[in-house]
Image: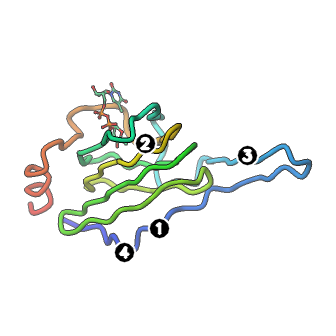
Amino acid sequence: MQYLDLDKIALKEIPKISDPDGRGNLSVVEKDYLPFVIKRVYYLYDVPSSSTRGGHAHKQLQQFLIALSGSFDVVLDNGKKRRTITLNRPDRGLLIPSGVWRELENFSSGAVCLSLVSEEYSEEDYIREYSEFKLFKSA
Ligand code: T46
């Protein structure tokens, strides 16, 4: 099983079009921007600052997370070590490959987490027990 090199994870810049007349910014995710075809979009919002989302890994699903508003931390765990990445800009996103444990925490007031993903919803794709994730990675 491959272990994602967490040191190589970098936020990916999303093309931004700033309006010359001061009407604000527009960012766009086009067809070939991500290394997967987007099959589903969902978003988290009204998350209490004391709450944690995620707490699982995906067997197949890849995803791209964007803090459309506010900020939150994403703790990535490759089975060997952890790294925390803060998302706080709507023009930067975090690509999470399959086989990575993730926890989302420290949501600011008004934070919105947009998730663009490679698969349709399937509970079968989730590993929700950390001990099972460790076994999955060592297989
Ligand atoms: C992820 C993080 C960032 C559905 O019915 N359809 C869906 O498309 C999704 C995503 C969830 N659900 C149901 C399954 C649960 O009964 O909604 C409930 C909450 O899902 P979950 O506990 O998985 O939510 P999070 O915020 O912990 O995780 C979600 C995604 O599931 C996951 O892929 O990476 O957001």
Q: Give the residue pinned by disc 4.
A: 7
The single residue placed furthest to the right in the displayed view is: 21
Describe the element under mark 1 as helix, strand or loop: loop
Dot 1 surroundings within 10 Å: few (below 14), some, or many (20 or more)?
few
Residue 14's x, y, as percent?
A: 62, 56
Q: Give the residue pinned by disc 3.
A: 26
**Amino acid identity at mark 1:** Ala
Residue 95's x, y, as percent?
A: 44, 56
Mark 2 or mark 3, which is nearer the start of the sequence? 3
What residue do we see at 68% from left, 48% from top?
27
Mark 3 or mark 1, which is nearer the start of the sequence? 1
Describe the element under mark 2 as helix, strand or loop: strand
Q: Give the residue pinned by disc 2.
A: 117
**Contact? badges 2 and 1 (CB < 8 Å):** no
Mark 2 or mark 4, which is nearer the start of the sequence? 4
**Contact? badges 3 and 2 (CB < 8 Å):** no
Dot 3 surroundings within 10 Å: few (below 14), some, or many (20 or more)?
few
- What is the CA distance from the residue labelled 4 to the residue labelled 3? 30 Å
Can residue 18 be seen from the camera position used here?
yes
Nearer to the camera, 119 or 48: 48
Note whether ligand 1 is within 8 Å of mark 2: yes
**Contact? badges 1 and 3 (CB < 8 Å):** no
Q: Give the residue pinned by disc 1.
A: 10
Residue 28's x, y, as percent?
A: 67, 47
- What is the CA distance from the residue labelled 3 to the residue labelled 2? 21 Å
- What is the CA distance from the residue labelled 2 to the residue labelled 1? 18 Å
Mark 3 or mark 4, which is nearer the start of the sequence? 4
What residue do we see at 41% from left, 48% from top?
63
Can residue 40 be seen from the camera position used here?
no
